[in-house]
Image (cartoon, rainbow, N blue to C red):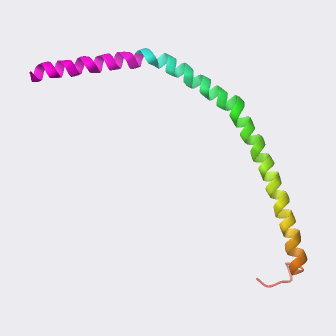
């Protein structure tokens, strides 16, 4: 019975291996399409949005520095 179970498991393993090998070309093609989509569509949007966020943050920090300067006088003459 152990020998029969072993053969059954080996046959199952072969079938799974065969199915995976049959599916690999399709998986590789789908991955290529996903990578192309990310590179062509997602990455440029992320870059644009990141640049916009950095510009907004820069403006806010500049305004904060202006307010700080107005409220505390010359920052170089102050104490730390």
Residue 28: where, in percent of width, then height? Answer: 52, 21
> On the rendered structure, is 61 left or right of 28?
right
Residue 26: where, in percent of width, then height? Answer: 51, 17
Placement of 62 over or under 79, stated as above or below? above
Quadrant (top left, top right, bottom left, bottom right) of the C terminus = bottom right
Placement of 43 over or under 71, stated as above or below? above
Residue 19 in the magenta stretch? The answer is yes
Residue at image position (56%, 22%) is: 30
> On the rendered structure, is 6 left or right of 30?
left
- Picture quadrant where residue 33 is located: top right
> On the rendered structure, is 60 left or right of 17?
right
Region rendered in magenta: 1-21
Placement of 41 over or under 28, stated as above or below? below
Placement of 60 over or under 39, stated as above or below? below
Q: How many marks?
A: 0
Residue 41: where, in percent of width, then height? Answer: 71, 31
Quadrant (top left, top right, bottom left, bottom right) of the N terminus = top left
Residue 79 in the magenta stretch? The answer is no
Q: Residue furthest bottom?
A: 79
Q: Residue furthest left?
A: 1
Residue at image position (28%, 21%) is: 13
- Picture quadrant where residue 58 is located: bottom right
Residue 21: where, in percent of width, then height? Answer: 40, 17
Dominant secondary structure, magenta: helix
Residue at image position (33%, 20%) is: 16
């Amino acid at each position: 019975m152990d020998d029969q179970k072993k053969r059954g498991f080996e046959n199952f393993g072969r079938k799974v291996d065969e199915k995976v090998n049959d599916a690999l070309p399709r998986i590789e093609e789908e991955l290529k399409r996903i990578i192309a989509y990310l590179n062509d569509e997602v990455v440029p949007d992320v870059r644009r949005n990141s640049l916009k966020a950095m510009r907004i943050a820069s403006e806010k920090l500049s305004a904060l520095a202006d307010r700080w300067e107005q409220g505390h006088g010359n920052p170089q003459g102050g104490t730390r």
